[in-house]
């Protein structure tokens, strides 16, 4: 007890300065990586190499359904179909299965295009610019900017969470608490936002899953039809109850998957996002003025190549980089407080 009291007295601030952080018992402070103090609501794995959304329960349901249905198909249907039809059936199903799982994991555990938040100095400088641009009176200064893209006026909205004006096609995800570049939507079935850096993998996941589901559905019907020719349909279902389960799962899921794939095929061909399509950003019904999509190349092939075959942009959040050892990020705040004698007022007001 005396030792604890002695430590509290030793760490008390003196001469009006801020208290110094307590050194770890090892004598050498471990350098923290940026993902350990990341402001968004994300989860990180493998020392920051992988990341996903905070709520990923539906993702594990998606992965479980794919693994279970495919496992039952390979275990109960493929041996019979290989013996009575062709060896190509398990080979095709195996290739589709590997492609589906790989694109799903890539979509779920990659950076969707998160933009880093403004630093305290950048936020203070931007606030000063907004205040100086505002007119006189009691009305607050505007929090929007207008830019011209291919002759079309686009408004940039101010994000109060990230303390910056969002670039074109960027939106703030309320579930992940991040501004995502070319934000499409937050998909609970993959457990992550879908944006600029992982949309192509999301689209390929939907497309390959549609082929895999339809392929398994057709093969299971073929399997049951061949068996029922000799012993009847009811006896065939009793012999292979796993096939009946696959049939039910594929029947109720194939329609929604095909519909979603068709919808995103339309978005890719038009160079639109789900967020823009739902809001009707470039719809003529929204305003009396003629409004066209400024990001479209007016060619289906060019739009598809731009969305799916363009160069992969680098991640901007540098989640595996080391944090500044001279600063400490307080939990629940976006402001960095210096460990020296600087106060919070100096950080906000003293912009270089």
Image (cartoon, rainbow, N blue to C red):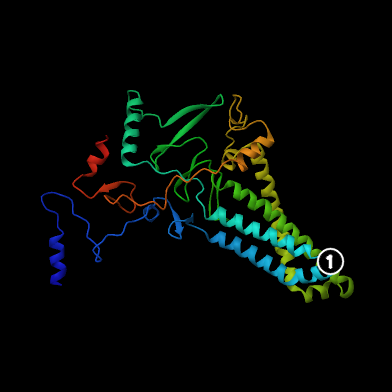
Q: Secondary structure at mark 1?
A: loop
Viewer can see residue 53: no
Image quadrant occupied by the N terminus? bottom left
Report the front residue among 165 and 26.
26
Residue found 36% across the figure and 28% down from its top: 139
Instruction: Indicate the position of residue 312 as horizontal and vertical percent values.
Output: 55, 44
* Badge 1 density bin: few <14, some 14–19, many ≥20, Cα 10 Å: few
- Which residue position holds label 1? 85
- Could you say which is closer to the camera, residue 224 or residue 319? 319
What residue appears at the point 60 percent right and 57 percent down from the top-left corner?
A: 102
Is 342 positioned to the left or the right of 308 in the image?
left
User: Going by the picture, which residue comes out furthest to the right?
Assistant: 230
Residue 40 position within the rendered picture, expressed as x and y whole percent measured from the top left: 42, 50
Return the residue found at the far left: 15
Q: Residue at x 63, y 53 (%)?
A: 205
Q: Position of residue 189 (x, y in %)?
A: 58, 56
């Amino acid at each position: 007890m005396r030792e604890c009291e002695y430590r509290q007295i030793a760490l008390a601030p003196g001469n009006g300065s801020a208290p110094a952080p307590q050194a770890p018992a090892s004598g050498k402070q471990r350098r923290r990586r940026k993902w350990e103090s990341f402001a968004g609501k994300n989860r990180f794995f493998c020392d920051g190499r992988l990341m996903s959304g905070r709520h990923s329960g539906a993702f594990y349901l998606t992965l479980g359904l794919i693994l279970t249905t495919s496992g039952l198909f390979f275990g109960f249907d493929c041996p019979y179909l290989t013996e009575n039809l062709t060896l190509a059936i398990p080979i095709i199903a195996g290739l589709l299965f590997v492609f589906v799982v790989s694109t799903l994991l890539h979509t779920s555990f990659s950076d969707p295009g998160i933009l880093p938040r403004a630093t305290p100095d950048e936020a203070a400088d931007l606030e000063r610019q907004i205040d100086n641009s505002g007119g006189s009176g009691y009305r607050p200064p505007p929090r929007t900017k207008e830019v011209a893209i291919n002759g079309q006026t686009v408004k940039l909205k101010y994000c109060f969470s990230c303390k910056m004006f969002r670039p074109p096609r960027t939106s703030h995800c309320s579930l992940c608490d991040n501004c995502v570049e070319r934000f499409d939507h937050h998909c609970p079935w993959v457990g992550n936002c879908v944006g600029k850096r992982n949309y192509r993998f999301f689209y390929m996941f939907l497309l390959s899953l549609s082929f895999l589901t339809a392929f398994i559905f057709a093969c299971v019907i073929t399997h049951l039809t061949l068996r029922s020719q000799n012993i009847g349909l009811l006896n065939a279902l009793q012999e292979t109850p796993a096939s009946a389960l696959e049939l039910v799962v594929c029947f109720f899921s194939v329609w929604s998957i095909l519909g979603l794939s068709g919808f995103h095929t339309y978005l890719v061909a038009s160079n639109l996002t789900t967020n823009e399509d739902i809001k009707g950003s470039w719809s003529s019904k929204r305003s009396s003025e003629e409004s066209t999509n400024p990001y479209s190349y007016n060619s289906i092939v060019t739009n598809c190549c731009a969305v799916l075959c363009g160069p992969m942009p680098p991640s901007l959040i540098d989640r595996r980089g080391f944090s500044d050892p001279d600063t400490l990020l307080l939990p629940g705040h976006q402001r960095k407080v210096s460990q020296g004698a600087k106060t919070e007022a100096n950080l906000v007001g003293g912009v270089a």
